[in-house]
Image (cartoon, grey):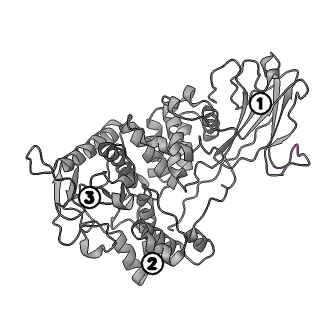
């Protein structure tokens, strides 16, 4: 059932359109994207060059020109794509990819500077589930204070305790399967427990990442993982308020990636990143670091498809999971990942998880779009969110009692709102809203055939209720027609 904002005096009438079909608008691209589009780079070559930007951006720019700097959280999925396309690389390219994917302890195989120096001696501290690895010399050394004289630096202990807390919340509390053991991996850190390496990757602008060296990753969608995180979260490049907060949100985010790899490591980017950001807030509710992504998400840019998967929008997708979990319980996210682990790819997994709860993605997404116009009333922490912008605002009056046809273009998994304002709506007068599909019916001369159209105005009565949000008592919701389609969810091949 669509979620409706509360009734408020003087509120405007909102018509929220949710679309579930079509193609997303072309996003801004850099030189690597253009090289991929024109065939200069194949899938594997593109993945390799994109992975090189993580640790050798200047070298990539020298070869390709204007190449975007990766987001601080991009490393996990960039390295995922490189690992998935590794079988397609040959010769020097494959050797370069293996060096990028090497663990920090593989010093001789890691000339990109994201591993321990050959002169540094790795140490580790373990509990029953995971091991934290560090060195005591070179720039990769964490703070070495040891106030409790345990022989283990306090920051290393704090890191282990934080990951243990995250493990307890995610696995024991929320019921997710733990990360798969990496026993079969070469150089597995000593045993099958999850390995977390402390490395000074903050100087390169990264909080952390998880990736896989599971020898079965080319044959299975379920793989083990290891994680690398910054050694102190004190580098100003990271822009964190406190090192401990940076550690906590990174641990929750990256640990959940390790969990995801145990379900299906080849899932859609927005699904993986959106739920990983969502998990940050589930484990550390007061951190609120995820608010930084609202501007690149359904509130700041409602016209951008939820699954855009680029330019930070994959992180802004967390809001959809907040909406779903507050309406169906936190188990809805685990249910979607459970379906993914059984072979349902991304949107199909979500649909089937919702179907078990007696609803569907079309209805839920319509409610999601409506809720985003009044977040303070629809989200537990909605007072911290800015409302989604309206695409168009139209003032009605006695002289202009109807809007005429209005073209509104809506991409799949996106929303658009037309706000109707004016004293006319304050009277107890029914308002009729017609929504016509873009192709075929009720076309006007100035309308594009592919654009949905809205016409609103005073009518004698309304005969059907629509999936719109109506915050004014004076407005009676109705809609003659609603068209929505559901995109298919094919699994992409490797690369």
**Crowd rating for badge 3 (residues with CA inside 10 Å; few <14, some 14–19, many 20+):** many
Residues marked 2 and 1 touching at CB (< 8 Å): no
Please tell me whether residue 452 is drawn above or below residue 55 in the rendered image. Answer: above
Direction from residue 427 to residue 227 in the image, left or right = left
Residue 128 visible somewhere in the drawing: no
Q: In the image, what residue occupies the spot 64% across and 40% down?
A: 362
Compute the Cα span from label 2 to label 1.
Answer: 56 Å
- In which quarter of the view is residue 1 placed? top right
Direction from residue 208 to residue 10 in the image, left or right = right
Compute the Cα span from label 3 to label 2.
Answer: 27 Å
Describe the element under mark 2 as helix, strand or loop: loop
N-term-proximal mark, 3 vs 2: 2
Direction from residue 86 to residue 370 in the image, left or right = right
Describe the element under mark 1 as helix, strand or loop: strand
Mark number displayed over residue 420: 1
Residue tagged by mark 3? 197
Residue tagged by mark 2? 89
N-term-proximal mark, 2 vs 1: 2
Residue 195 percent coordinates (x, y)? 25, 56
């Amino acid at each position: 059932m669509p979620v409706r904002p509360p009734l408020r005096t003087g509120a405007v009438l909102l018509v929220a359109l949710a679309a579930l079909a079509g193609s997303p608008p072309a996003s801004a691209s850099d030189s690597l994207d253009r090289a991929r589009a024109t065939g200069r780079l194949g899938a594997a070559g593109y993945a390799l060059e994109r992975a090189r930007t993580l640790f050798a951006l200047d070298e990539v720019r020298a070869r390709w020109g204007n190449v975007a700097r990766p987001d601080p959280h991009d490393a996990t999925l960039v390295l995922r794509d490189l690992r998935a396309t590794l079988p397609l690389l040959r010769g020097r390219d494959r050797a370069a990819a293996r060096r990028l994917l090497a663990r920090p302890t593989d010093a001789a195989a890691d000339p990109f500077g994201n591993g321990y120096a050959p002169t540094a001696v790795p140490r580790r501290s373990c509990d029953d589930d995971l091991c934290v690895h560090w060195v005591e010399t070179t720039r990769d050394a964490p703070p070495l204070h040891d106030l409790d004289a345990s022989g283990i630096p306090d920051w290393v202990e704090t890191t282990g305790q934080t990951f243990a807390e995250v493990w307890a919340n995610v696995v024991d509390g929320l019921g997710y399967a733990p990360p798969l053991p990496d026993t079969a991996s070469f150089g597995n850190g000593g045993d099958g427990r999850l390995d977390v390496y402390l490395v000074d990757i903050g100087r390169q602008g990264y909080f952390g990442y998880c990736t896989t060296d599971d020898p079965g990753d080319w044959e299975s969608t379920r793989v083990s993982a290891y994680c690398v995180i910054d050694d102190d979260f004190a580098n100003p490049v990271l822009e964190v308020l406190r090192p401990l907060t940076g550690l906590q949100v990174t641990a929750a985010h990256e640990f959940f990636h390790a969990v995801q790899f145990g379900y299906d490591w080849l899932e859609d980017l927005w699904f993986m990143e959106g739920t990983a950001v969502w998990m940050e807030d589930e484990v550390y509710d007061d951190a609120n670091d995820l608010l930084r992504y609202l501007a690149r998400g359904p509130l700041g840019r409602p016209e951008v498809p939820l699954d855009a998967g680029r330019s930070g929008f994959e992180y802004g997708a967390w809001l959809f999971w907040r909406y779903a979990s507050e309406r169906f319980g936190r188990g809805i996210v685990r249910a979607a990942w459970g379906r993914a682990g059984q072979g349902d790819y991304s949107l199909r997994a979500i649909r089937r998880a919702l179907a078990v709860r007696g609803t569907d993605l079309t209805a839920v997404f319509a409610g999601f779009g409506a809720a985003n116009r009044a977040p303070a009333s629809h989200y537990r922490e909605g007072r911290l969110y800015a409302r989604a912008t309206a695409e168009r605002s139209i003032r009605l009056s006695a002289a202009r009692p109807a809007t005429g046809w209005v073209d509104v273009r809506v991409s799949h998994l996106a929303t658009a709102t037309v706000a109707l304002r004016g004293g006319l709506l304050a009277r107890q007068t029914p308002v009729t809203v017609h929504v016509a599909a873009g192709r075929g019916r009720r076309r006007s001369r100035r309308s594009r055939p592919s654009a949905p159209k809205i016409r609103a105005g005073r009518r004698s009565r309304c005969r059907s209720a629509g999936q719109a949000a109506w915050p004014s008592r004076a407005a009676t919701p109705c809609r003659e027609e609603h068209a929505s389609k559901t995109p298919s969810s094919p699994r992409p091949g490797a690369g």
